Image (cartoon, grey):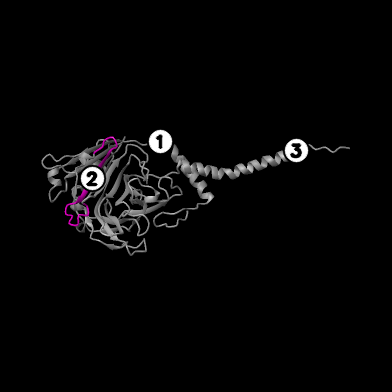
Amino acid sequence: MCGCSEPGWGWGHCAPGPMLLLGLLLFSAPFRLLGEETRLVSLEVIPDHSGPPENLLHIRAVGANSTLHYVWSSLGPPAVVLVATNTPDSLLSVNWSLLLSSEPYGGLVVLPKDSIQFSSAVVFTRLLEFDSTNMSDATAEPPGRPYPPYSLAEFSWDSINNTLDLATLSATFQGRPTHDPTKAFANGSLTFRVQAFSRSGRPTQPPRLLHTADTCQLEVALDGASPRGNHSLFGLEVVTLGPAPDCPTMKEQHSIDDEYAPAVFQLNQLLWGAAPSAFVQWRPVAFSQKHGGRESSLPCQASPLHSTLAYSLPQSPIVRAFFGSQNNFCAFNLTFGASTGPGYWDQNYLSWSMLLGVGTPPVDTLSPLVLGIMVVALGAPWLLLLGGLVILLLHHKRYSKYQSLN
């Protein structure tokens, strides 16, 4: 594999050898011949007719023989329940009375129950902040003196009805702390933008993660909030729940191609099961400007996964409504930025993206630009050799016709 200057973040410049280049070229070519899988995707904000509007977004992605259900909500901390079924006719049923009660199990059901092949959940429980003023080790854990975290279960969230966009298959949850004595969020907010896809492709904004019809993208953005220190680093506490008692596996993939996310040669993944039933995927990079680019990119550091008890976490009603008393939760932290270089303090802005999906994670093939460069780089020596042989043959033929004069 190639060697990068900071392998923990996947940053730096790699120097792959010609055999690796040729191998990746041959390996990636067949994948470009595969067709695209499509799904019929619908987005619906499910209303509670008996009370004030609640943020419950149902994304239903129907294929030829299966259906994916993504249920996103800001009841409690922002969370998503993912359910995959083996029929195109499965439906989501919501019982609001149960869902909003102290014992919500059964308030969220996918029918028919025997069609469910896999289910999992991801919960974003806390917004973390660290003072990195005197930190020189960017990989330290924690990366500075921690401030009291913001519990996302105690945020107030705007109605997503105002941001639901059926053309782009997206919606945005925007919130701020219910109690904000320091007025840190007086002019700021935390947003979770959710987007589904009906076919394969890439967004226009970095890190341009390759998505398929089996995935849903989340972009988290902290915008305009006042930090509690001059060099504050922010992070997220992420909690997962899956069908097995063991935590998902965290893996890293490396690539020689950084066209879509400049200077980032790594892809991080959480995988459920030996043959992945579901996954979370992201590049270890965040951005300190709204129009992200290499100059505003920040490293994203992930802590190891560890098991945690449900009672120590902010509770998500939709997770409890679907999974009941299951407690095989695993948690990890994401930290964005380092004490040096660009940071949130530049423009009081931070964004990070991830994919959630089922099946095998999308595999980045070499981009057309890199393929063209590789073809030229690998083909040029052979063209020069061939040209040299032609010149030698012509030169030899010219002198072989010489006849001495007697």
The residue that appears at 57% across and 43% down in the rendered structure is 379
SS at circle 1: loop
Q: Residues within 10 Å of mark 2 (few under 14, many from 20)?
A: many
**Nearer to the camera, 305 or 287:** 287
The residue range painted magenta reads 164-185
Q: Is residue 246 visible?
A: no
**Nearer to the camera, 149 or 95:** 149
Query: Which amino acid, by three-letter code, is at mark 2?
Result: Phe
The residue that appears at 52% across and 51% down in the rendered structure is 17
Quarter location, residue 145: bottom left
The spot of residue 54 in percent (x, y) is: 16, 43
Query: Which amino acid, by three-letter code, is at mark 3?
Result: Arg
Give me the C-alpha separation between circle 2 and circle 3.
78 Å
Give me the C-alpha separation between circle 1 and circle 2.
34 Å
The spot of residue 302 in percent (x, y) is: 33, 56
> Which residue, given by chain and number where applicable, does mark 1 sit on?
35
Q: Residues within 10 Å of mark 3 (few under 14, many from 20)?
A: few
SS at circle 3: helix
Residue located farthest toward the left when viewing the structure as drawn: 50
**Nearer to the camera, 262 or 53:** 262
Q: Is residue 291 visible?
A: yes
Mark 2 and mark 3 residues within 8 Å of each other at the beta carbon: no
> Which residue, given by chain and number where applicable, does mark 2 sit on?
173
Q: Residues within 10 Å of mark 1 (few under 14, many from 20)?
A: few
Mark 1 and mark 3 residues within 8 Å of each other at the beta carbon: no
The spot of residue 404 in percent (x, y) is: 84, 38
SS at circle 2: strand
> Which residue, given by chain and number where applicable, does mark 3 sit on?
398
- Of callouts 1 and 3, the N-terminal one: 1
Magenta part, dominant SS? loop
- Of callouts 1 and 2, the N-terminal one: 1
**Nearer to the camera, 130 or 265:** 130
